[in-house]
Image (spheres, helix red, strand yellow):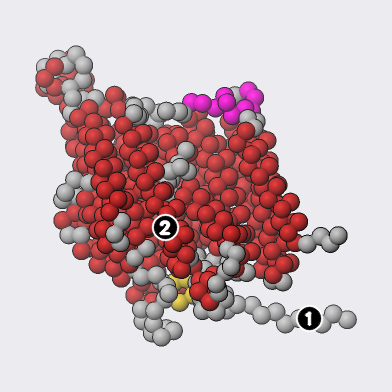
């Protein structure tokens, strides 16, 4: 059995779906945050696979951009989370319910 | 032995990105000023001078580009630069100027506000400038990856700005919600980019030879499922940024919790940047796929119009109500996008320009009225405002009526243009739903206006200003003093709405010339 590009694409799709589902159903903000990272990495896998299939280096270069953006997001996201949970105990999204309507 | 390979690097035509360079440079200079000046009292004034230089410099360069692009550099007309990553056309420059005007107004509005709320002032200015430079990149991006980077450059500072008010839990909550949902939508957008890349082999939007537009017009795809799913995911990501239903869930919370000048900035400039990318992706790269994306935009437009105007009816908070109204405004602009004609493009551009003035004006008055704390914006709290603050109440009434689309204001002209574009493309149902939504919207705008002109309870007749009772005396003495900077913002916003209302040619003259590349 040969492993073709499609297998990688399907794995990436599964990872992306797991990430998206996790973000929607989990209540812990840190886990939600990790789910976003999972989604971004699934996209990276998709890019690399397509680059290999198309024999084009462009897709591989894009991965570097994605990594940098993900790192910047982590820095800002964790800072916001820390700022909030200094004032409140616990990290569940259900407790953050001041704004609604 | 490894021979040094001769790398071919793209030539850089600096004028093409100079507005962005100047604006981002001013943001870096602000950060440096903070690092060098520490807590010296002159740091903030210096910061403001740098910010003003950056915004005005970028604006002057953008105007120069506007003139230059139709001159004979490369035979005249729009061109791409930096390995086709950036495109210079009047469409992008028009929106760059809208974004810069909105940035300038938001900055002026913030000066007194920052003092009053004791926010970190210098960091605030730097973040605002960084976010605005991301928006400028977005308006001129010609590659899906550049669009993605611009999306992040504009979003990440905004997450911080929304959460900046650490004395208010609502601000931090809004920041967290915006961050989680924003990064979710960015990931979806990026997956869309990956699938489009897989379907076409490139991420360049439009250029001769190797680009999505050239690929799609040169090939008939037998199996275009990947590409279509990719396109839909792109629409989800951009729909989120422009606050179109059903991707609007974050909007009310974030608009309510964010510092009020930032709410105005997001409603005007972020919307303009988001629609810049949306229009460019759909009109240049995927123009041959109109049959596929037009129904999706149709659905987004209808949902935004109905959700925005109906949910706004039930709001008790003014900022929240304006958030829903901003969703319905996104719906009107989507009507113009759906038309997929030059008329639609003009209408969308004019709408974005006029809306920027209306919404910054509205949030400007709310900022001035917010007082210390910036937490209480219930519509009930505006009861009797007309007796206490006749001028500010009049201004808010004016901006709300303009947003409702009352004739002789810019809001009317903007809506008229959108409906004309829909009518010209034979989208009668869409135009009809738009008019229905405008009728519903008129109700909630008027409800807020009527509340302002209702006498507060216990003071029949509204003679609060007569000064006969000690209570009335107190009310007179409590009259707000509008700081000069906010005064300038309100004056400019009023002038913008009135001038476009009486002489629509002012904006349409330029919108008509703002053609896209291709």
Q: Is residue B2 visible?
A: yes
The residue beneath circle 2 is B294
Question: Which residue: 33% across, 35% down?
Answer: B310
Between the residue at mark 1 and the residue at mark 2, the CA separation in whole angstroms equals: 50 Å
Looking at the image, which residue sits at the far right? Answer: B1
Instruction: Name the residue that disc number 1 marks.
Output: B4
x and y percent of residue B194 in the render? 62, 59
Where residue B422 sits: x, y (%)? 29, 57
Q: Which quadrant holds residue B2? A: bottom right
Percent coordinates x, y for residue B56 in the rendering: 37, 61
Q: Quadrant of the C terminus of chain A?
A: top left
Q: Which span is picked out in magenta?
A: A89-98
Number of residues whose C-alpha sits closer than 10 Å to that of mark 1, classed few (under 14), some (14–19) or many (20 or more):
few
Between residue B251 and residue B103, name the one nearer to us: B251
Image quadrant where residue A65 sits = bottom right
Q: Is the residue B363 above or below the residue B236 in the image? A: above
- The main secondary structure of the magenta stretch is loop
Q: Is residue B365 magenta?
A: no
Q: Earlier in the sequence, mark 1 or mark 2?
A: 1
Q: Given contact means CB atoms under 8 Å apart, are the residues at marks 1 and 2 in contact? A: no
């Amino acid at each position: 059995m040969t492993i073709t590009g499609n297998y990688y694409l399907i794995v990436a799709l599964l990872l992306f779906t797991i990430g998206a589902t996790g973000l929607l159903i989990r209540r812990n903000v840190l886990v939600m945050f990790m789910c976003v990272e999972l989604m971004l990495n699934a996209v990276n896998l998709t890019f690399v696979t397509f680059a290999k299939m198309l024999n084009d280096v462009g897709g591989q270069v894009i991965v570097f951009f994605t990594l940098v953006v993900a790192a910047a997001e982590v820095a800002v996201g964790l800072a916001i989370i820390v700022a909030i949970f200094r004032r409140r105990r616990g990290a569940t999204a259900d407790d953050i319910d001041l704004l609604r309507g | 032995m490894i021979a040094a390979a001769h790398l071919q690097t793209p030539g850089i035509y600096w004028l093409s990105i100079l507005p962005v360079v100047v604006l981002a440079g001013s943001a870096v200079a602000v950060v440096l000023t903070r690092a060098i000046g520490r807590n010296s009292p002159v740091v903030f004034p210096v910061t403001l001078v740098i910010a003003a230089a950056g915004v005005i410099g970028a604006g002057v360069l953008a105007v120069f580009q506007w003139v230059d692009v139709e001159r004979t550099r490369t035979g005249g007309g729009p061109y791409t630069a930096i390995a086709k990553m950036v495109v210079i056309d009047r469409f992008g420059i028009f929106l760059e100027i809208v974004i810069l005007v909105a940035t300038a107004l938001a900055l002026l509005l913030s000066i007194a506000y920052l003092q009053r709320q004791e926010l970190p002032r210098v960091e605030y200015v730097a973040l605002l400038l960084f976010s605005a430079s991301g928006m400028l990149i977005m308006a001129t991006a010609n590659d899906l990856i550049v669009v993605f980077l611009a999306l992040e450059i504009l979003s990440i500072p905004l997450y911080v700005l929304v959460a900046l008010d650490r004395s208010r839990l609502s601000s931090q909550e809004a920041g967290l919600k915006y961050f989680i949902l924003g990064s979710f939508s960015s990931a979806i957008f990026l997956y869309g980019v990956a699938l489009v890349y897989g379907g076409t082999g490139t991420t360049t939007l439009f250029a001769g030879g190797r680009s999505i537009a050239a690929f799609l017009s040169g090939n008939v795809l037998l199996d275009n499922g990947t590409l279509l799913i990719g396109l839909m995911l792109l629409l989800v990501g951009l729909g989120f940024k422009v606050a179109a239903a059903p991707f609007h869930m974050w909007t009310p919370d974030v608009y309510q919790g964010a510092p009020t000048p930032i709410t105005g900035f997001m409603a005007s400039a972020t919307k303009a940047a988001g629609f810049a990318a949306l229009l460019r992706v759909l009109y240049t790269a995927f123009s041959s796929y109109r049959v596929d994306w037009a129904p999706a935009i149709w659905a987004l437009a209808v949902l935004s119009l109905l959700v925005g105007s109906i949910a706004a009816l039930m709001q008790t908070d003014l900022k929240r109500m304006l958030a829903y109204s901003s969703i319905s405004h996104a719906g009107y602009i989507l009507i113009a996008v759906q038309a997929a004609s030059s008329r639609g493009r003009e209408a969308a551009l004019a709408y974005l320009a006029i809306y920027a003035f209306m919404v910054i004006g509205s949030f400007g008055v709310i900022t001035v009225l917010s007082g210390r704390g910036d937490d209480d914006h219930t519509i009930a709290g505006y009861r009797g405002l007309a007796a206490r603050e006749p001028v500010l109440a009049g201004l808010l009434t004016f901006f709300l009526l303009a947003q409702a689309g009352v004739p002789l204001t810019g809001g009317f002209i903007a809506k008229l243009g959108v409906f004309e574009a829909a009518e010209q493309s034979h989208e009668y149902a869409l135009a009809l739903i738009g008019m229905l939504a405008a009728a519903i919207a008129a109700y909630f705008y008027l409800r807020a206006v009527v509340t302002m002109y209702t006498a507060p309870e216990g003071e029949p007749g509204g003679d609060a200003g007569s000064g006969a009772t000690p209570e009335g005396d107190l009310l007179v003495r409590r009259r707000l003093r509008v700081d000069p900077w906010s005064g300038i913002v309100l004056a400019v916003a009023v002038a913008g709405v009135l001038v476009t209302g009486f002489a629509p040619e002012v904006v349409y003259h330029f919108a008509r010339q703002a053609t896209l590349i291709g």
